[in-house]
Image (tube, coloured by chain):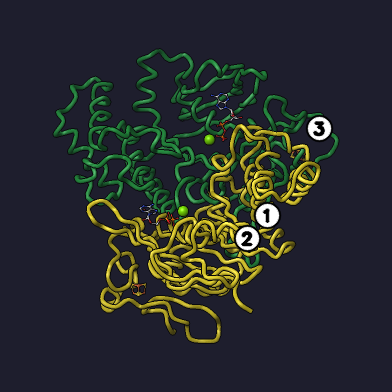
Amino acid sequence: MTALLQVTGLTKQFPLKGGRVARAVDGVDLTLDAGEALGLVGESGCGKSTVARLVLRLIPPSGGSIRFAGQEISALGDTALRPLRRGMQIIFQNPHAALNPRRTVFQSVAEPLVVQRVASGAALRSRVGALLTEVGLPETFLWRYPHELSGGQKQRVCIARALALAPKLVVLDEPTSALDVSVQAQILEFLRELRMRQQLAYLFISHNLAVVRQVCDRVGVMYLSRIVEEGPVEAIFAAPRHPYTRALLAAILPPRPGVLPAETLAGDVPNAAAIPAGCRFAPRCPRRMPICTIDDPGLKRVAGGSPHSVACWGSFSD
Amino acid sequence: MTPLLDIRDWRLAFDGFEGRAQVLDGINLTVMPGETIGIVGETGCGKSVLARSVARLVDMPPGRILGGSIHFDGQDVMAMNGAALARLRGHGIAMIFQDPMTYLNPVFSIGAQMVDVIRAHDRASGQRPRNSAAARKKAADLLGSMRLPEPAGMLDRYPHELSGGMRQRVLIAMALIGTPRLLIADEPTTALDVTIQAQVLRLIAELVAMHALTLMLISHDLGVIGALCRRVVVMYAGTIVEDGEATTVFANPRHPYTRGLLAAVPDLEKPQHRAQPIPGQIPNLLSPPSGCRFHPRCALAVEQCTRDKPVMRDVAGRSVACHLAEHA
Ligand SMILES: Nc1ncnc2c1ncn2[C@@H]1O[C@H](COP(=O)(O)OP(=O)(O)O)[C@@H](O)[C@H]1O
Ligand SMILES: Nc1ncnc2c1ncn2[C@@H]1O[C@H](COP(=O)(O)OP(=O)(O)O)[C@@H](O)[C@H]1O
Ligand code: SF4
Ligand code: SF4
Ligand SMILES: [Mg+2]
Ligand SMILES: [Mg+2]
């Protein structure tokens, strides 16, 4: 079976003032099968949203290949992309900003159907009603405005709109980061069930590994524009290899008192315009060795049969 | 010992076009010096309005006090005159918020803003303001104690040049200028990545210990509260529904809402454990539910819950407001 999405050697450079260049995505490989959910996790600024925008071809890549449903789309122009766009949708972090405050729920959800001339009149009305039911909102919400909805309800409306054209791939860019934990749990449960009902593939972006675990089959951990560990979710949780993955896991606060992590990862995500030589995590790594600042470890399969890869000199075998 | 903060039957409403929203409905809260208390509840529960009430920062109107009192270190906050209020805000209470950008001026450097605050504090405490070189030195020292790299260089940078975590550290540094006794941190890490959240929480824990601060930490996430606070106060729709030692409440929550908030936090140590949602959402405070305000979302609700408002009472070593607290 060919993958729904196959990304190889993807790069994106943004020119900065003074002739410098931000290497926002710096050699990323991804595979996503139909109906599969892949999490992409890392701190702010590591390149997650740029990967999302490239995969959806909202921006052109600087290099590499993106195949969607078997078709190479990395160099397509707008006209050629238009029919493909129905198959891929995105949900953003902030549902408050994603909805037009002057439009009713009906107008927002109906918009893609109207623009693509999929339905009109009574058929449109019933299709939008069915989409609301799908995301767990009553049909009485059709005539509400965004200010009459809670954050979680707005995010459901955004999801209904994204589902309108029956996409194959939904990119979720931090879909719960702006929500309360109680509402986050609602949305995560809903996303998990939705995928089981509808054979949707997710590219699920988050800075929190715990959130990804609830929804995804596989996870890629991104650090400074590249994936540094990748594998099945449960394998990564059971035996994280990369020191960065371990640091991300250690930062998650469990529902128990008195468990503030003693050692926190120092410093912010470094600059994509000044990626260090060797291992890009070396400046923050508690396990740094001499080789680390000289040679880039590259992403390699770990010993043993599992499809688990890591980019760390200290972690290829143990 | 005098409580540092003593809130009695505090009732506050907002009047608007659509009517009166009773946002705080009889809050009772006593905080002793040195306590670390966490206030937890979903967005809209009234946590920020409560915090702002303590520093008398709620705008009136649209706010309106319906009753109750707030004492800080034995003094009636509502009766304070201008000078006393300035002392309260300058030296008694310091606040930090979710979005530091709102409280930093984008057109002035970090150093210029800190120097202003330092000199204003000198004046407020009746001293001659120190000269700007001395104030800059003090600012750099403070930034250094926030574990900010190159504190002296940081003084010449502008807010937009800093990351979210750095800005929050700058705000914490500014909050400590007046050597406050109570630090109110209102969702200080909600907008940050988990890694930066852990750094900022650790910093707050160290500062609280070093300066013997009393801490009131506000969050919608019990994981955050558990990391720093020894006492937890759960708010629902303008009321306190559970209040006790964190170890007691986390191990054996007695209010169904507290149980819901706990189950909503993902727990990596439980295999296959998924965060559980709380069904429904917080009520519109223009017309809050009768009886127990939580009853429309409560799986245990019985007929009495729709009729009688539960009062706080002692059950199993903490206070809780639920008719069924003994059985739950
Ligand atoms: N349009 C742009 N111009 C310049 N730099 C950009 C642009 N978009 C993103 N970047 C940079 O690329 C890096 C990755 O950003 P982003 O993909 O938004 O990260 P994330 O989503 O993981 O927070 C950051 O250093 C960011 O500053
Ligand atoms: N200035 C204001 N005017 C009118 N209503 C307000 C104002 N500030 C807060 N509220 C209302 O008070 C309630 C509690 O808000 P808040 O204390 O901010 O909640 P929390 O901090 O728990 O999220 C909400 O319903 C909010 O809409
Ligand atoms: S390669 Fe070296 S510096 Fe990089 S993560 Fe592994 S041990 Fe740390
Ligand atoms: S009083 Fe009744 S409705 Fe309220 S929390 Fe207790 S059982 Fe539930
Ligand atoms: Mg992003
Ligand atoms: Mg608030």
Q: Residue at x 36, y 58 (%)?
A: A269
Q: For the residues labelled 1 and 2, say whether their Cβ atoms are less than 8 Å apart.
A: yes
Mark 1, Cα crowd under 10 Å, few <14 / some 14-19 / many 20+, is: some
Mark 2, Cα crowd under 10 Å, few <14 / some 14-19 / many 20+, is: some
Q: Nearer the viewer, mark 3 or mark 1?
A: 1
**Residue B99 image-quadrant placement:** top left
Given the image, what chain letter belongs to the residue carrying mark 2? Answer: A
| Closer to us: B40 or A292 | A292
Given the image, what chain letter belongs to the residue carrying mark 1? Answer: A
Query: Where is residue A108 shown, x and y percent of the image?
Result: 65, 41
Q: Which mark, by number, is residue A87?
A: 2
Q: For the residue marked with disc 3, what is the amino acid?
A: Thr
Q: For the residue marked with disc 1, what is the amino acid?
A: Leu
Q: Residue at x 21, y 22 (%)?
A: B127
Q: Quadrant of the N terminus of chain A?
A: bottom right
How far separated are the C-alphas under marks 3 and 1? 43 Å
**Residue A318 image-quadrant placement:** bottom left
Query: Where is residue A3 shown, x and y percent of the image?
Result: 59, 74
Asked whether mark 3 and ligand 4 are closer than 8 Å, the reply comes as: yes
Q: Nearer the viewer, mark 3 or mark 2?
A: 2
Q: Residue at x 56, y 31 (%)?
A: B29
- The residue singled out by tag 1 in the image is A165
In green, which chain?
Answer: B
In yellow, which chain?
Answer: A
> Is B321 left, or right, of B244 in this rendering?
right
How far separated are the C-alphas under marks 1 and 2? 7 Å
